Structure formats: structure tokens, C-alpha cells
Image: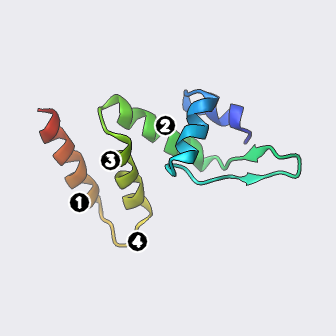
Amino acid sequence: MKIGEVAKAAGIGIDAVRFYERKGLIPEPARRPSGYRMYSPDVVLSLRFIRRAKELGFSLKEISELLSLETAAEATAADVRQVAEAKLADIE
């Protein structure tokens, strides 16, 4: 998918996609010979997650931690729950 397609599907702007890529929240996509970024459909799910987490008040650092738990082999759902509950306690 091209960056515009990804941004539209995730409900964010193109600049936001580039920003999250620079911050390391989403992987740098492969590029076509023409230079266009080509994103996998999985990136849309990550961007939607990032957008929703921001709406809930998570910082980019906290979102990064949650995303890293997703890819960590030893991470469990309890680990994710612990981070989310800590944030909820901060909010309350």
C-alpha cells in the first residue's frame, strides 16, 4: 500500500505516518524503484492502535512499550494489561 492509502485506512494524515515511522513506532517500509514507500497492510492495524492509544492518553513512549510487547516472544497478555492498568491508575 502507498502512504496515502495507509493514512486514509488508518484515519490519520500522511505526515503522521511519516512521524510515527521516524519515531520507530512502525517499521520503515520497503521502497519501490520509483522511491514510493510500500507499506504492508499490517501497518494500518498498528497505526489504528497508535491513534486509539493516543486518544486514551498514552504517551508515544508508552505506546512504543506496548508495541514492543506485541513483538516480544516472552511477553504475555498480562504484561500488556499491567502497562494499561498502570496508565489507568495515572489517569485516575
Q: Amino acid at mark 2?
A: Arg
Q: Position of residue 24 (x, y in %)?
A: 51, 52
When asked about the image quadrant of residue 1, the answer is top right
Q: Position of residue 35 (x, y in %)?
A: 83, 46
Q: CA distance from mark 3 to mark 2?
A: 15 Å
**Classed neighbour count for the residue bearing mark 1: other residues with Cα under 10 Å, few (<14), some (14–19), many (≥20):** few
What residue is rendered at 73% in x and 55% in y? 30
Can you identify the residue that label 4 sits on? 73
* Residue 78: assigned label: 1
Q: CA distance from mark 1 to mark 2?
A: 22 Å
Secondary element at image label 1: helix
- Quadrant in which the C terminus appears: top left
Can you identify the residue that label 2 sits on? 48
Q: Amino acid at mark 1?
A: Ala
When asked about the image quadrant of residue 88, the answer is top left
Q: Is residue 60 above or below residue 68?
A: above
Secondary element at image label 2: helix
